[in-house]
Image (tube, rainbow, N blue to C red):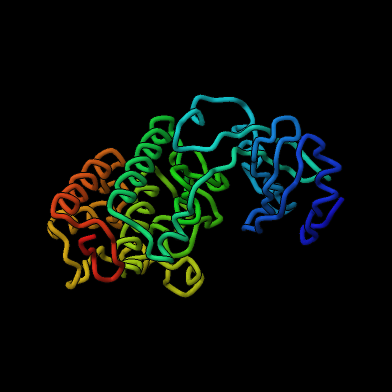
């Protein structure tokens, strides 16, 4: 059996998973390695995640794996990738997921290649997906630009039943809500994530209220983060059509108290209204730090 640190080689993985041709190793996250592969019979592209020994021994991991394996209506949604297979390889758990086509939101934000129309469509789909998960009592738990590919939300490692409390802080630093500093997640945690991504996309930086989990061990850090006032400020040079509406979107979607935030459905309506005003005014291309300019 391999050690936690030793990666599963592609040839070794193909020997164990004979149904799949491993194309390449995509990378490594906090829970294991991810590979791009194809089904040998159909040529269907898939993503295979092999979890390391440390993550597979954590409390609740087997429940999480079983939830993904059994076919459930929750994953039959256009905003989610479906789990196709799961099991163990060389003693380590693995999952096989649909391959999500399309650009990654993280790359679009970094390369300043966003339009109002794309943001409207992407966030409408994202918030519909979060509303769908909420209706099934599920929290995605790690909504971040890296986990939005095309029009789909990927990576279910932090997905749990709502509400969820854990001694381990799981998420993407920079986009985490204040309650995550103490391991708590609920459905409006995902709403907070979505607002942080939107702010980053529009203004090229994260708002000052973002909480830093890397400082959680500092004396008094958790108390400071939990009591930190929400003070969202829109850059003064961003030529938005309805600054009051945008201000309200971020303030109410990122309140420090998760039970006072907007839900996904209300946030989706407000964002569509705000973006429609930008498009109606002839603004099409989003320019980070400065808002938008006419195409």
Is residue 87 positioned above or below 270 on the image?
above
Q: How many numbered markers are drawn?
A: 0
Give x and y (percent) for residue 291: 23, 65
Q: Is residue 244 left or right of residue 260?
A: left
Q: Is residue 158 left or right of residue 57?
A: left
Give x and y (percent) for residue 228: 30, 66
Can residue 58 be seen here? The reply is yes
Can residue 57 be seen here? The reply is no
Question: Looking at the image, which is closer to me, 66 or 104?
Answer: 104
Quadrant that contains the C terminus: bottom left
Q: Residue drawn 49% across and 59% down? A: 172
Q: Is residue 175 left or right of residue 12?
A: left
Q: Residue drawn 35% across and 48% down? A: 191
Question: Looking at the image, which is closer to me, 275 or 170?
Answer: 275
Q: Residue drawn 36% across and 51% down? A: 194
Q: Is residue 19 left or right of residue 158?
A: right
Give x and y (percent) for residue 292: 23, 63
User: Which residue appears farthest toward the front when viewing the image?
Assistant: 295
Q: Residue drawn 68% across and 44% down? A: 48
Residue 144 occupies which quadrant of the picture? bottom left
Is residue 204 positioned above or below 162 on the image?
below
Residue 93 occupies which quadrant of the picture? top right
Question: Looking at the image, which is closer to me, 91 or 283?
Answer: 283
């Amino acid at each position: 059996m391999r050690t936690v640190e030793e990666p599963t080689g592609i040839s070794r993985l193909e020997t164990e998973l004979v149904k799949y041709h491993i194309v390449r190793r995509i990378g490594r996250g906090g829970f294991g390695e991810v590979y791009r592969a194809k089904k040998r019979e159909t040529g269907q592209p898939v993503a295979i995640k092999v979890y390391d020994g440390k993550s597979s021994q954590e409390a609740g991991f087997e429940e999480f794996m079983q939830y993904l394996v059994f076919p459930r209506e929750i994953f039959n949604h256009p905003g989610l990738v479906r789990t196709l297979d799961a099991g163990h390889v060389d003693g380590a758990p693995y999952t096989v997921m649909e391959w999500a086509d399309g650009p990654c939101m993280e790359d679009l934000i970094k390369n300043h290649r966003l339009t109002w129309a794309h943001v409207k469509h992407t966030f409408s789909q994202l918030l519909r997906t979060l509303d769908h998960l909420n209706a099934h009592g599920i929290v995605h738990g790690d909504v971040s630009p890296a986990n939005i590919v095309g029009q789909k939300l990927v990576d279910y490692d932090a997905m749990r039943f709502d509400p969820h409390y854990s001694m381990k802080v799981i998420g993407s630093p920079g986009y985490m809500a204040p309650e995550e500093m103490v391991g708590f997640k609920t459905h409006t945690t995902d709403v907070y994530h979505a607002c942080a991504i939107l702010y980053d996309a529009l203004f090229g930086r994260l708002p000052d209220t973002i909480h830093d989990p890397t400082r959680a061990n500092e004396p008094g850090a958790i108390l400071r983060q939990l009591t930190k006032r929400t003070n969202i400020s829109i850059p003064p040079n961003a030529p938005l059509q309805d600054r009051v509406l945008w201000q309200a979107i971020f303030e109410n979607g990122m309140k420090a108290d998760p039970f006072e935030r907007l839900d996904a459905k209300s946030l989706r309506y407000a964002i569509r209204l705000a973006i429609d005003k930008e498009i109606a005014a002839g603004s099409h291309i989003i320019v980070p730090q400065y808002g938008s300019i006419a195409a």
